[in-house]
Amino acid sequence: MSAYENLLKFWREYPVSNGGIHPKDIIPEEKVAYIKDFSAYIKSKWFFKNNKVIHSGLLPSPYCGNIEKARVYFLSLNPGFSPCDYFAEAEIEFRNASLVNLTQKGRNLPFLPIVPSFCWTSGAEWWRRKLAPIFRLYLRQGMSYLHACNDIVGKIASLEIFPYHSAQFGGGKSLFKIESVARMKDFARNLSRDQSKLLIVLRKASEWDLEEADNVLLIPRNQARKASIGPFEEKIFMALRK
């Protein structure tokens, strides 16, 4: 079984109806808060606390986009958290798209944060800022923001080394030893061997354990917090437009 098949097999076993942490991921209970929806979040003790708790009531987000056929991959730490995430998962179109993304079984597997109809989500806002240098290059060529979105929506993907939502990542080295992390690292390692793929490691390069190469770009450690893709914008743009 390939690393790609191994990763998908793992996430296709995720109990969507029950939610929570994947049964094969062992995480201490004190690090996790299971909150079922937006209303419950408002009433919970975690309301507007930007801390390290893992929101296991939200769908895991180990990746986004077509992880087999994308040209450019952005490797990061974890999906983050915003109160909007609970609201978004209650919206049926977005939840269904997220489920298709998780299983990777759909014919169309777009990078959801730049799908125009999902521009209101917290993920869209974060990625709009992150991809700003790329959008500027499209604008210089006389293409609109919408044209740029439609052009790259099927060409980029994101990979998260830790798949669960939290406002701040915490827990030390132990959280990098769970099964989902091992499978994601194996997938990324194999992906890096394909010279037709461009990988940009935004966060936690030391944990991804990838060596810098022509097709593996590492954000400098002193810029890792900001994770700006500015230094690599031309190379990313060329990979998208070829």
Image (spheres, helix red, strand yellow):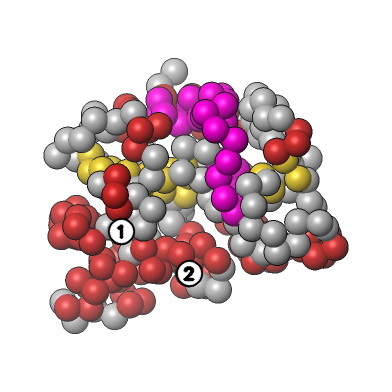
Judge depth for marks 1 and 2 and give the one in front.
1
**Marks 1 and 2: CB-CB under 8 Å?**
no
Which quadrant holds the C terminus? bottom left
Query: Could you tell me how many numbered marks the image carries?
Result: 2
The residue range painted magenta reads: 163-188
Q: At numbered mark 2, what does the secondary structure look like: helix, strand or loop?
A: helix
Q: Position of residue 69 (x, y in %)?
A: 34, 43
Q: Position of residue 169 (x, y in %)?
A: 55, 45
Tag 2 residue: 125
How crowded is the residue under tag 1: few (<14 C-alpha within 10 Å), some, or many (20+)? some
Which quadrant holds the N terminus? top left
The answer to which of 227 and 3 lies nearer the viewer is 227
Q: Residue at coordinates 17% horizontally, 78% vertically from top-left?
A: 140
Q: Is residue 208 above or below residue 34?
A: above
Let me know if residue 168 is in the magenta part. yes
Q: Residue at coordinates 36% horizontally, 63% vertically from top-left?
A: 130
Tag 1 residue: 228
Q: Position of residue 47 (x, y in %)?
A: 75, 62
Q: At numbered mark 1, what does the secondary structure look like: helix, strand or loop?
A: loop
Label 1 to label 2: alpha-carbon separation:
15 Å
